[in-house]
Image (cartoon, grey):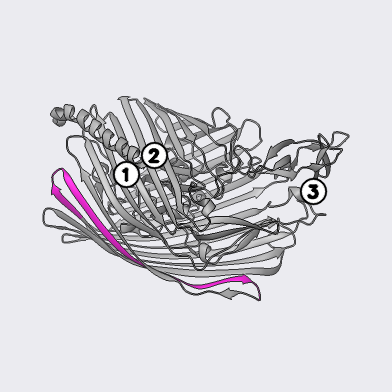
Amino acid sequence: MRKFLLGAFIFGLVFILHGFAIAEDENEGKIIKLGKVVVTATRTEKNVDSAPGSVTVITSEDIQKHKIHAIDEAIKYETGVFAKRVKGLSESMAKVQLRGLAGQDMTLILLDGLPLNEGYNGSVDWNTISTENVERIEIIRGPASALYGGNAMGGVINIITKTPDKFYANTKFGYGRSDTYHDDTYRYSINIGDRFMDKLSIGLGFEREETKGYPTCLITRSISSGTGTLTGGWGTENTSGTRKWVVGDRGDNSAKRWNFNLKTKYDLTDTGSLAFNFQQGFHKYDYERPHTYLRDENGNPTFSGNVDIGGGESASVEPSNYAYYSGISEKENFNYSLVYKEMFGPVLFNGKTGYQKRDKWYTSAYPSLTQSYYDAKGTLSESDSYSWFTDLQASLPLGDEHFLTFGLYFRYDDFENDKYNISFFRDEQSKTEKTIITKGSDRFYAAYLQDEWQIIDKLTLFTGIRLDFWEAFDGESGNVGSVEKFDEPDETAISPKVALVFKPVADTIIKASAGKAFRAPNIYDLYNSWSSGSKTYHFNPDLDPETLWNYEIGVDQYFFSRRIKLSATYFHTDIEDLIYGYSEKIDGHTHQYKDNAGEVEIDGIELGISAKPVNWLRVWSNYTYNDSEIKKHDKPEVEGKKITSMPLRTANLGAEVTYRWITASIAGQYMGKIYKNELNNDVKDVYGGNTEKYWLWDTKITVAPVKNFEISFSVENLFDKEYYEYYVGRERSYFIEVGLKW
């Protein structure tokens, strides 16, 4: 009944909007036709209204209206998007997820058309991508494996960088801090570009940001019977409902990032060009010395003893408790791509090749009872990841009604990880012995074909299909001296899709589609096992690829010369062999396993409205509802539960003002219920879990009183909302930035 009501709602809305549109159809010639161009939806240039599926384009001007730490935050207010970044610049595991599908590896992220998802685990290092050289971001919701293969289950996000067509130069410097903490943040950037001899375009950019950070991780201790002499801290629960006592925090979570980027393009002919894109990015986080919330009998801060919490209960604490899980991490990414475009008669050829290299290391403290933050032992993890890509595409018209796109694709990933014991967790050079080795590689070969058929002027049919062959090999994992080698799985996937775009009257666009997508298990899923404290994560070399079928229908309706836009989409997704984690406790130790969960259904609604009542004001709002249910699972108690790590509901609301030399924005985001464990019974509103329902508001104002100068002031978490997304959310913070541009 629920699915019927959801579908009936969307269909009813389609016909209501259609009826309104008929009244305006007589004024078709007077309506101003505006439209952004998108290339990701069909791999060729297409007006957004004519592109199949639910599509959004975010321009560089849109990005500048908000304060962002990294480019993923430019996407967070869009319909159907869940962008997870709770710690600001200190967040090392930021994710952008679409259509209710948890995990960055289920949404494909492209940089100028080439994948950014790491072959090891499908993650994207958002911190290392430039924020200043972006021309636009294209968001394609819904499965796109028919054109893009694996990782494109929830959709595709393509970050397209700037190609200079004339001289420009700009530089910015900014400073910020929060209400309470001395988390000073500095940011500066410089960009310059020009076009020479009407053939060669060159753009260069560098940006850097650094913060002292704030305490993101609390230290909690178990409560037992007894008395103590220490005071301070407060009581809480963990996500399982067990009472805990907060005794301190892990310290200020500092971070820094920088990016250097180069974009060149040379026009070989009137119709052909060769472009080279390079980005090198760096990100580091650290935990400074920990803080204690406890006081001894003389009122002095202390890190050891027993806390008297009253009622005949106490909590014991040692210096080692403040060091556990603390550590340092550095990652550096290199992205190279070469793109050749040319017209050969009626055929448009687009060839891309790229190479990505990622170097990462991190330390974790595992002190003995007598050790503290200042002398704790630990472990070091060092990993190298490499990926090579080639994508050869051709497009040509077939008569007056058909437009054909076809191509070949290849990808190779290689990963190696070594773990060591180290004598001091804050010195990555203090290696004592290698303990664990993990290796693995995979390859993808693919061919794809799409036909765009203009059936009549108002109706276009898109049909596409892609054949992917995937294989994993050279998988090794285990302790040094007992490394296990694994079989070499392979699989063939066929991903078809069909979509209709119907424009019955002026400014009414109805879109419907059905498509299949897949995701092969990555190297992390297949081969990597690791432990953190009392929990061990296990790999599974016998995993099968995930597959899904998605069905959707949506409508976009414009009113009043396109000053108002209403959008509504309903989709239903059936997933099979979803790779899903579950935990079991054995002798007091938690073991986290991965398996093909069985069957999952998702019903979703995406609603949006944007209005520009006057030229200087734009107001907008959107709402996303993702109702997931695990229909079949090896653990029967999980059946009927929701997918973890995805909000059931999100909503965004905002307004933007552009008046003469003033630009201002305010935006709010509502986050609904998010489940942490597979049984959906985790305690909400506690550290380690998620705040159940909350709004966060940000605002920014930019003033440009003279031609080449601007100054901006922004506030994040405007109303200082306290919240958790596992970590402690950032409190209200301020940022001021000045810029010069030519």
In front: mark 3 or mark 1?
A: 1
Identify the residue at horizontal 48%, vertical 34% (top origin). Answer: 670
Q: Which amino acid, mark 2? A: Thr
Magenta part of the chain = 452-481
Q: Height in image: 565 above or below 453?
A: above
Q: Is mark 2 on a helix, strand or loop?
A: loop
Q: What element carries label 3?
A: helix
Q: Which amino acid, mark 3? A: Pro
Label number found at residue 451 = none
Label number found at residue 79 = 2
Disc 3 target residue: 319
Front-lying residue, 416 or 64 = 416
Q: How many labels does the image show?
A: 3
Within the magenta stretch, is there residue 182?
no
In front: mark 2 or mark 3?
A: 2
Q: How crowded is mark 3: few (under 14 residues within 10 Å), some or many (20 or more)?
A: many
Front-lying residue, 405 or 224 = 224
